[in-house]
Amino acid sequence: MKVLLNNSSLFESLRPFDDLGFVPTMGGIHEGHLSLINKSNKLCKKTIVSIFINPKQFNNKKDLKSYPRNLKKDLKILKKSKKVDFVYLPKFNDIYKDKKKSKIILPKKDKVLCAKFRKGHFEGVLDVMNRLTRIVNPQKIFMGEKDFQQFYLVKKFLERNHKVRIISCKTIRDKNNVALSSRNFLLDKSNLNVAANVYKKLVNIKKNIKNKENISSFLNLGKKELRNNFKIKIEYLELRYMNNLNISKTTKKSRLFVAYYLNKVRLIDNI
Ligand code: AMP
């Protein structure tokens, strides 16, 4: 596993390879990231992982400051996996010194779910993914369904603007079905217990949606119960189609999306 600390060593090292799988991350490496790496390793000759906490996608300074950072441990895990050929650890300037603006405007219809609550977040994500793709120039990029809206928007944007394919990977969960996330490092055991119960309730809500006349009021009731039972702040609980993220009235080809705050940590999931 070769560690690339700047763009010139990256360009030099990647030049010979034309079957490159790319797994962009913000570190805090866990089994979810490793599942993306495994898939890349199976489908591509070489796999490159990046670790870069992109300040421009954080709409909240406190969130950026408290985001888990543990580079030493991350590198150890990646090395031990034996599935990573290159780790790219860019500095801010490696990504942003290219002043070529990629003006990114989310269409109004995409300003739903996290885009509605985290102003500027996806503009930041699309900008950094556009830059990373230009620099790394991979054939395939692997992204998790845990962040489904991110996968959806990045796929739409990058496949239109680059010769690259974005490949989705299933959500990896812990033994209590809590979706793995770097942010879980900020939670204690009792918080994780609540998250496990929220997951159970979501499964129950999705199961019972099927025979409901008025889905929106049923989801409002679900929200109220989640709030009261678990003392969490919920941003959204919505059933949406996977192919366009429009509101759905059926569980077919649709997912239930949730975002909530637990102990001031913002968690998202979709089932
Ligand atoms: P992050 O480091 O949180 O920015 O995530 C990097 C990539 O890993 C993104 O494509 C995420 O969707 C993906 N990812 C994060 N958590 C999981 C998970 N539990 N299962 C599968 N993929 C995940």
Image: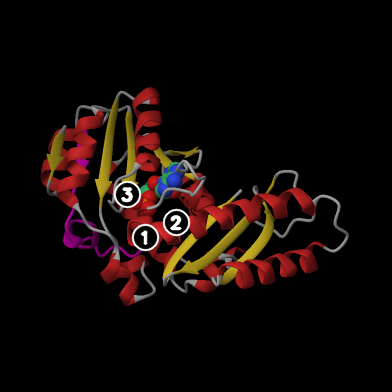
Which residue position holds label 2? Answer: 192
> Mark 1 is on which residue type?
Asp
Q: In this figure, what is the number of numbered marks?
A: 3
Q: For the residues marked 2 and 3, what is the alpha-carbon distance in whole angstroms?
A: 22 Å
Residue 148 placement (x, y as % from top left)? 53, 51
- Magenta-span inclusion, residue 201: no
Label of residue 188 in the image? 1
Q: Are marks 2 and 3 in contact (CB under 8 Å)?
A: no
* Label 2 CA crowd tier, 10 Å (few <14, some 14–19, many 20+): some
Measuring from the top left, give residue 150's x and y in whole percent.
48, 54
- Amino acid type shown at disc 3: Thr
Q: Residues within 10 Å of mark 1 (few under 14, many from 20)?
A: few
Tell whether 12 sits left or right of 190: left
Determine if the C-beta at disc 3 is less than 8 A from ligand 1: yes
Mark 1 CB lies closer than 8 A to ligand 1: no
Residue 62 appears anywhere in the view: yes
Q: Earlier in the sequence, mark 2 or mark 3?
A: 3
Q: Nearer the viewer, mark 3 or mark 1?
A: 1
Camera-side residue of 178 and 64: 178
Residue under label 3: 25
Proximity of marks 2 and 1: CB atoms separated by less than 8 Å: yes
The residue carrying pointer 3 sits among few (fewer than 14), some (14 to 19) or many (20 or more) residues within 10 Å by Cα, namely: some
Image position of 271 with respect to 187: above or below: above
- Please identify the quarter of the rendering in which residue 74 is found: top left
**Magenta range:** 86-103
Is 94 colored magenta in this rendering?
yes
| Mark 1 element type | loop
* Residue drawn where x is 38% and y is 65% of the image: 124
Q: Is residue 88 visible?
A: no
Q: Is residue 253 left or right of residue 7?
A: right
